[in-house]
Image (tube, helix red, strand yellow):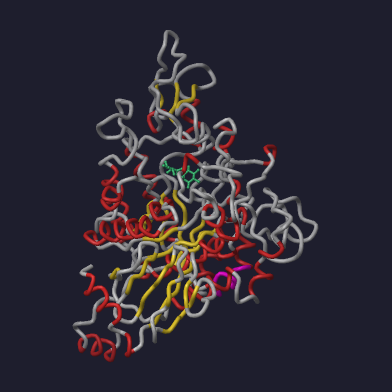
Amino acid sequence: MTQAESTATAALPELAAPRPWWRDAVVYQVYVRSFADANGDGVGDLAGVRANLPYLALLGIDALWFNPWYPSPMADTGYDIADYRAIDPAFGTLEEAEQLIAEARALGMRTIVDIVPNHVSNEHPWFRDALASAPGSPERARFWFREGRGENGELPPNDWQSIFGGSAWTRTEDGGEWYLHLFAPEQPDLNWEHEEVWTEHEDVLRFWFDRGAAGVRIDSAALLVKDASLAEPGDGDHPFEDRDELHDIYRRWRAIANGYTEPRVLVGEIWLPDPVRLARYLRQDELHTAFNFDFLACPWDAQRMRTSIQSALDVHEPVDAPSTWVLSNHDVTRPVTRYGREDTSFAFKAKRENTPTDLARGRRRARAAALLAMALPGSMYVYQGEELGLPEVEDIPPDRKQDPMWRRSGGVDPGRDGCRTPMPWTGEQPPFGFSPDGAARSWLDQPADWAPLTVAAQQGDPGSMLSLYREGLRLRRSVPWSGDAITWLPTDDDVLAFARGDRFVCLVNFGPEPVVVPDGAEVLIASNDLEGGALQQDTTVWLRLTDHDRNWATDRSRKEGR
Ligand code: TEU
């Protein structure tokens, strides 16, 4: 520190530390397989991401989260990891990943990598060693191997069901023990009672943090610990969800993350019905943030949305963690499709396909939802293609489907391929610039009618979804809001209105009655054109209150006693 700097610091003792970047970051989720294919093999790669970093920088995001990019047999498109310290050759090399992290950082974007601690690939050296070793061996102790039930052990050790359907147990090929897999059989679960499982993952964290990763997204973060008695789910603690011992794991991880000059960030993928339980993972010495899936799954309804938003804020406040706002990811039905249906709710294990869908309506709502999410205090996630308003692809023929959820459910669950289709960049027909000319067929086909959805088609059009995202994210950095609190303003039941500070209001009209923008308020951005100064159904606006009307928010809320 120079003399001048130390004087400056001494003169400003009251100055708080700068706000940590992750508290209100916009994080863009890159599903590498489907982002951009530079080498023409029909699969996206790191070179494709590097070539398109300017596109991401222009979008106005703060960080990139990459779905697993490690060597994998791809039984679950990369969530079955064979080596946590390398890059799958289909995507590139470790050196390229390091370059990518540095290049993104130079453009102002941090990198979050995906860590999968619940299970490994069945081709991971640990599991291969386990299969090659005898029951009761130390090699098997890193997993959950058990004798079967029945006279000859022909029945699984218990009735736990895999999240992808069917039994959560598979018997070894020699007809010996069974092993546990909460997901596909190619994803054996690790035993988190084993010290080496802890130390290995802590080392993997350091490996990526040392290479410049700003944080990790922790896959299936509430599933790692199991009840060793193999009890069936009942009234008490769940045998493999949200168990108390998990918090010790994340306290150790937090200490590692805090050991860096710029502390690294831990983001949990935690699906829990009870937001109070979710917030326990966000205590000061545990994870920094977690995905807010309640908001994602919430039906498009003013009061349901209000309840979801308020309960997220309520449970985050006491632990001083920011909420996150998520509308989509690689596991869920695309918002344009979801919001275009009669029933706009989402449930992971009750996905539907080809139910009547009004895509124009869905798009309108998805636009309104995007501006709503961008206006809320906390951080926001954008899943690639969301900014283009891609719909779910619902007509993938069975022989082209890849997702084990579809296969293991015997075709009952449509699977998640429909939200993983390659990005359309340019041109009039597939692969729409995803791959170079003459490339191999894309790993999933794009619909032939996506020409109007390409980046090239949208970027010059001020009315496009892409322009809405760019403009909304740009404004998000400069709007006159203050603090992390929101004040709900009194409205009709079909309308949401909240203020942030005394100069900013976000208004969302869910209902059929037009809502007139108050006199004098300046419209900063609207998800759809206003008609005669009024918001039609399924429209969000951001308003700047001028001196003349800046008491509007506070006066109205006081009057209603809310
Ligand atoms: O998803 C985790 C997952 O599927 C569960 O947490 C599920 O969402 C929950 O039980 C619903 O109630 C992650 C990845 O996002 C997904 O792509 C992988 O297939 C899965 O883990 C296995 O690694």
Which residue sits at x=56%, y=75%?
58
The reply, left or right, for residue 53 in relation to residue 370 is: right
Residue 231, picture quadrant:
top left
Image position, residue 500 (x, y; %): 32, 74
The reply, left or right, for residue 424 in relation to residue 500 is: right
Q: Residue furthest front?
A: 513
Which residue sits at x=54%, y=36%?
123
Q: Which residues are the magenta region?
A: 52-58
Residue 306, picture quadrant:
bottom left
The reply, left or right, for residue 288 in relation to residue 468 is: left
* Viewport quadrant of the N terminus: bottom left
Residue 4, picture quadrant:
bottom left
For residue 502, above or below residue 346: below
* Viewport quadrant of the C terminus: bottom left
Q: Residue furthest right?
A: 438
Which residue sits at x=76%, y=63%?
428
Most foreground residue, 309 or 124: 309
Q: Main secondary structure of the magenta part?
A: helix
Q: Residue furthest top?
A: 151
Image position, residue 347 (x, y; %): 45, 44
Most foreground residue, 555 or 441: 555
Q: Examine the structure image and report whether residue 65 is included in the region drawn in magenta.
A: no
Most foreground residue, 462 or 155: 462
Image position, residue 376 (x, y; %): 37, 67
For residue 539, above or below residue 460: above
Image position, residue 148 (x, y; %): 42, 17
